[in-house]
């Protein structure tokens, strides 16, 4: 049987693509894709931060990085009121017409049955008017927390939306904060943002157990002059503090003390008073010692006939703990004591003449 030869194949110089060629090709394609992507981004202007997501035309997209905060601010518009000086009603309309010069500051809903929280820098008597949403209210009752300067105002309203509080020991320096302020010419509010510069800001070297000892410091508060008592929130919507003017500096009354003030309001109780002045050693530059030392150069360090005086506390005593709470830079003597009620008994551990001892105190 005759053997068949293979078909003749014409010689060629073409070879299968090498790995190097494939790499070069992939790099060229990637470069082209990146160039096209860059042109698309430039044409759509994604880097431009404007007010809201909108689509004015098919070729332009505007993005706002603050949009989640704006949404939270809108949610809390029903929880933030404006405090205005009383003015005469317009004839025929039976409604007052407020202006910016009539705005005194803010007030925040803390109970659903009509209690709002402001400060003594905004509400100084019972005559101001509360504007919440599209309703105007007269103040029915006032109560004041002398410790913080917070003023509670009762209006005839129900089913209100209270704010949520956040304890300040969970704060992070640098986190984003926002607030909104009632506008006299609109039901909408003005929106502002800032950053937390300091979570335990002490204004004075000599502190007292009977006054607020620390505040929250804002990075660059650029608010109107009459924005007092504006509530500040974090990105989760938790209230962190109320704006307060402290010697021409804008600070926040911390939520830790505000929350306790609300509890005293609801329980109809009073804050404890130890009557002691002290220096927070750990929060002052240059001191390596921890704890608080009872001292004041111009006032009695232990007020005569006070609870601390009766318990035997003295000038120069170094307070290191209250019950099981160790006094530290973030847990001060003042903040620890404010967790107790009148009549409670606590054990204060002190260091006197380098000897540690316990003193029982009835608050």
Image (cartoon, helix red, strand yellow):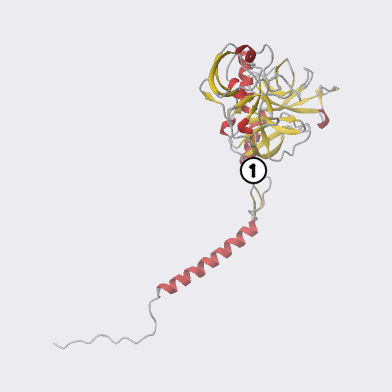
Tally the numbered discs: 1
Residue shown at the point (13%, 87%) measured from the top left: 1
Quadrant hosting residue 106: top right
Between residue 206 and residue 181, name the one nearer to us: 206
Residue shown at the point (73%, 21%) measured from the top left: 299
User: Residue 201: x percent and y percent?
Assistant: 66, 33
Quadrant hosting residue 175: top right
How many residues crowd around disc 1 within 10 Å: few (fewer than 14), some, or many (20 or more)? Answer: some
Q: Is residue 217 visible?
A: yes
User: Residue 316: x percent and y percent?
Assistant: 63, 23
Residue shown at the point (64%, 56%) measured from the top left: 44
User: Which residue is under mark 1?
Assistant: 66
Give the farthest residue toward the front: 353
Q: Is residue 133 above or below residue 31?
A: above
User: Residue 275: x percent and y percent?
Assistant: 66, 17
- Look at the image and tell me in which quarter the C terminus lies: top right
Q: Is residue 239 above or below residue 344?
A: below
Give the farthest residue toward the bottom: 2
User: Residue 123: x percent and y percent?
Assistant: 76, 22
Between residue 52 and residue 249, name the one nearer to us: 249
Quadrant hosting residue 9: bottom left
Residue 128 as seen in the image, left or right of residue 359: right
Residue 315 as seen in the image, left or right of residue 7: right
Give the farthest residue toward the left: 1
Residue 40 as seen in the image, left or right of residue 150: left
Between residue 257 and residue 130, name the one nearer to us: 257
Q: Is residue 51 above or below residue 320?
A: below
């Amino acid at each position: 049987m005759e053997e068949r030869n293979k078909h003749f194949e014409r010689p060629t110089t073409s070879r299968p693509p090498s790995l190097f060629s494939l790499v070069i090709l992939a790099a060229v394609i990637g470069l082209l894709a990146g160039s096209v992507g860059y042109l698309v981004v430039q044409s759509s202007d994604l880097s431009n931060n404007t007010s809201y997501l909108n689509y004015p035309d098919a070729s332009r997209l505007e993005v706002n990085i603050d949009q989640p905060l704006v949404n939270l601010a809108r949610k809390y518009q029903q929880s933030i009121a404006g405090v205005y000086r009383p003015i005469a009603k317009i004839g025929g309309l039976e409604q007052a017409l407020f202006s910016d010069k009539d705005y005194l500051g803010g007030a925040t809903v803390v109970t659903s049955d009509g209690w709002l929280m402001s400060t003594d820098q905004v509400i100084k008597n019972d005559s101001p008017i509360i504007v919440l949403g599209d309703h105007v209210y007269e103040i029915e009752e006032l109560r004041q927390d002398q410790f913080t300067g917070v003023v509670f105002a009762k209006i005839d309203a129900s089913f209100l939306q209270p704010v949520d509080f956040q304890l300040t020991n969970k704060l992070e320096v640098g986190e984003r904060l926002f607030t909104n302020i009632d506008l006299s010419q609109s039901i909408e509010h003005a929106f502002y943002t800032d950053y937390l510069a300091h979570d335990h800001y002490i204004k004075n070297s000599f502190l007292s157990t009977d006054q607020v000892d620390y505040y929250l410091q804002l990075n660059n508060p650029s608010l109107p002059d009459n924005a007092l008592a504006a509530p500040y929130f974090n990105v989760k919507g938790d209230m962190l503090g109320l704006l307060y003017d402290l010697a021409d500096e804008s600070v926040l009354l911390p939520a830790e003390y505000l929350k306790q003030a609300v509890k005293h309001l609801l329980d109809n109780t009073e804050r404890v008073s130890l009557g002691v002045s002290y220096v927070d050693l750990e929060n002052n530059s240059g001191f390596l010692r921890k704890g608080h030392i009872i001292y004041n150069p111009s006032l009695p360090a232990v007020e005569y006939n006070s609870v601390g005086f009766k318990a035997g506390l003295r000038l120069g005593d170094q307070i290191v703990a209250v019950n099981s709470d160790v006094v530290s830079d973030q847990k001060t003597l003042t903040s620890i004591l404010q967790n107790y009620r009148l009549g409670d008994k606590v054990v204060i551990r002190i260091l006197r003449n380098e000897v540690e001892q316990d003193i029982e105190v009835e608050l």
